[in-house]
Image (cartoon, helix red, strand yellow):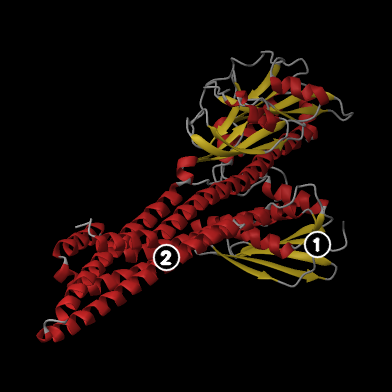
């Protein structure tokens, strides 16, 4: 049957009609994979920037904590006189009030440990002058972040240490204060950064030794595999790079961004944001499967139409020969001609649909080639897929309408197509695809907003003073902390007034707003309300954070800005949030006013002068 000239001719027509659609589809799939890689690279770079800023902020916070404690006159005097009990009491406060610190101790200038908390008899009296944290701080007598090492005190976990000199009134070093963080703590600092399935955040110290891994359990095994990688060595010299490599710990191919993080001592640590290549290409494979399904259905319908047209053509020729000899068959010939006309109309409609799909493939390829923003690219492709589904549904509807006619001429083919339709369960799949695509588009919008807010929140280096939009910073900070408020079922309301841009270190002001919002949320009961307002008051720009929580006891309100003082239960607060915020506002020439009524709530108002630079 397939060797007949009429069948062969129509088969060629079908192949020629479908070839452009297939070529455009393959090209669209290729450009989609390229764009997915570009999206993963930019996504990883953004996450690496966030991770680097978070790591630097946490390490600087540990340094600030050490400097604050070491700078207390009572600590310096106690260290100079070897008052073990008084020094140990301060060490105990550091460990018990800071969730991040696991151990703290003091060394003399020869490297011998003479006071610690928790008390470890196996370490007291031992000399640790060979440790990196002792050698590093002696170079310039300023705070130093150590390499990863296994400590001597039980249970001997892997840790990093921050060492700070304790100076007397004349500025001379009398001892060294050392605080230690377990690697689980370093990992937890980056735990909120989600890279998606198969992704991980990795932290390396200044020798390339593994200091944190969001997908690995770091106990007592020292991992030095990363230090052997050439890209890590480049990052340790301050170079940012994005490559595809085999993660030595996970054993998988990853697309990763290696971002150096410069610490105050001039050393570089490295944050790696990586994502599994297989997981990254998963959306492309899903799109490919959907495209292949559409191609199979379209090819099957077009082939059926070609067979119908070939048979109609043969019948028309036979009736033309008989027309001259059999007038009695005139009505039958006219009826056959009408049937042929209807079949041709159906075939033309199907070819129009094929041309629409071919044009759609070109459009998808063009969008994929020209788009610059990967998030917009994915959103546009979802929109294209939704329109494709409309075309496919229309095509399937036409097929269903032609099913009786097809049943007459080719029952076997009609049965095979019907079985294929039922086996794919398209009655269920097509409506659900609309819902999946709509939720995907909403997810992309939320990702875009979250990334924008995170960048707005931390867009400046801590020491850079520029003219900034305070309202934008407050709004981005509220968006970031909204998850905490939602978790505790606390409502946040914003009332942003018309205020002039302010010359300030915006990321530091964002930190103040974040601390005030966090405290306000913690102070509220379930169903509580927090309100943030911005407004101008004479020569000052004001940021007010109010809550309807428990309020502050009048007997302790004068101490709320003291370091380590907290009204929260033990283990839930460090007592440093308001102290640090107070220092930041003072650095900007401003002040913080507090109005609190026990049982009714509190209002913290940050006042910043307009003209200060």
Quadrant assignment, res 595 = bottom right
Indicate whether 391 appears above or below 162: below
Q: Which residue is disc 1 drawn over?
A: 502
Quadrant assignment, res 323 = bottom left
Q: Which residue is disc 2 drawn over?
A: 357
Q: Identify the residue at image location x=14%, y=65%.
A: 411
Q: Residues within 10 Å of mark 1 (few under 14, many from 20)?
A: many
In the drawing, what numbered circle is on residue 322? none
Camera-side residue of 52 and 128: 52
Where residue 462 sits: x, y (%)? 76, 47
Q: Are marks 1 and 2 in contact (CB under 8 Å)?
A: no
Camera-side residue of 298 and 97: 298
Indicate whether 347 appears above or below 192: below
Question: Is 289 left or right of 319, judged from the image as shown?
Answer: right
Camera-side residue of 65 and 570: 65
Q: Identify the residue at image location x=60%, y=34%.
A: 203
Mark 2 secondary-structure assignment: helix
């Amino acid at each position: 049957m397939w060797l007949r000239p009429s069948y062969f001719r129509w088969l060629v027509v079908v192949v020629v009609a479908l070839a452009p659609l297939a070529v455009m589809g393959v090209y669209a799939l290729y450009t989609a994979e390229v764009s997915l890689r570009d999206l993963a690279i930019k996504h990883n770079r953004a996450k690496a920037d966030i991770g680097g800023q978070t790591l630097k902020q946490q390490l600087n916070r540990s340094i600030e904590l050490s400097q604050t404690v070491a700078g207390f006159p009572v600590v310096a005097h106690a260290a100079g006189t070897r008052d073990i009990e008084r020094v140990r009491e301060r060490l105990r406060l550091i460990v018990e009030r800071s969730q991040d610190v696991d151990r703290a101790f003091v060394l003399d200038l020869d490297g011998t440990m003479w006071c610690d908390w928790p008390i470890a008899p196996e370490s007291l009296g031992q000399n640790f002058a060979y440790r990196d944290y002792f050698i590093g701080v002696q170079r310039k007598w300023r705070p130093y972040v150590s390499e990863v090492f296994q400590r001597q005190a039980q249970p001997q976990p892997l840790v990093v240490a921050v060492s700070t000199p304790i100076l007397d009134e004349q500025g001379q070093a009398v001892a060294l204060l050392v605080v230690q963080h377990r690697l689980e703590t370093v990992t937890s600092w980056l735990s909120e950064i989600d890279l998606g399935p198969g992704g991980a955040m990795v932290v390396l110290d200044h020798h390339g030794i593994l200091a944190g891994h969001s997908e690995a359990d770091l106990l007592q095994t020292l991992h030095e595999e990363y230090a052997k990688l050439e890209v890590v060595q480049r990052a340790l010299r301050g170079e940012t790079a994005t490559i595809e490599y085999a993660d030595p710990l996970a054993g998988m191919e990853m697309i990763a961004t290696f971002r150096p993080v410069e610490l105050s001592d001039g050393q570089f640590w490295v944050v790696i944001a990586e994502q599994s290549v297989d997981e990254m290409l998963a959306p492309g494979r899903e799109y490919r499967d959907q495209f292949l399904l559409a191609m199979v259905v379209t090819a099957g319908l077009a082939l059926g139409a070609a067979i119908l047209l070939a048979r109609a053509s043969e019948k028309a020729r036979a009736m033309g020969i008989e027309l001259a000899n059999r007038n009695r068959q005139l009505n039958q010939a006219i009826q056959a001609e009408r049937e042929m006309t209807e079949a041709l109309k159906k075939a033309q409609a199907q070819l129009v649909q094929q041309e629409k799909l071919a044009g759609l493939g070109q459009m998808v390829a063009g969008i994929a080639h020209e788009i610059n923003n990967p998030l917009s690219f994915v959103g546009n492709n979802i929109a294209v897929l939704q329109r494709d589904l409309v075309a496919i549904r229309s095509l399937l509807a036409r097929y269903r309408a032609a099913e009786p006619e097809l049943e007459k001429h080719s029952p076997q083919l009609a049965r095979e197509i019907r079985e294929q339709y039922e086996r794919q369960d398209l009655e269920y799949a097509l409506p659900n695809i609309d819902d999946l695509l709509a939720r995907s588009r909403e997810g992309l919008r939320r990702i875009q907003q979250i990334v924008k807010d995170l960048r707005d929140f931390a867009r400046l280096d801590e020491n850079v003073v520029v003219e900034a939009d305070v309202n934008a910073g407050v709004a981005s900070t509220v968006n970031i902390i909204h998850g905490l408020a939602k978790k505790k079922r606390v409502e946040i309301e914003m009332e942003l007034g018309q205020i002039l841009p302010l010359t300030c270190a915006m990321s530091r002001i964002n930190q103040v707003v974040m601390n005030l919002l966090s405290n306000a949320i913690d102070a509220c009961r379930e169903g509580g309300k927090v309100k943030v307002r911005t407004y101008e008051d004479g020569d000052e720009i004001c940021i007010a954070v109010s809550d309807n929580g428990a309020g502050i006891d009048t007997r302790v309100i004068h101490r709320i800005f003291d370091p380590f003082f907290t009204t929260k239960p033990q283990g839930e607060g460090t007592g440093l949030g308001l102290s640090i915020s107070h220092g930041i506002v003072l650095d900007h020439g401003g002040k913080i006013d507090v109005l609190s009524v026990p049982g009714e709530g509190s209002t913290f108002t940050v006042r910043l002068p307009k003209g200060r630079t």
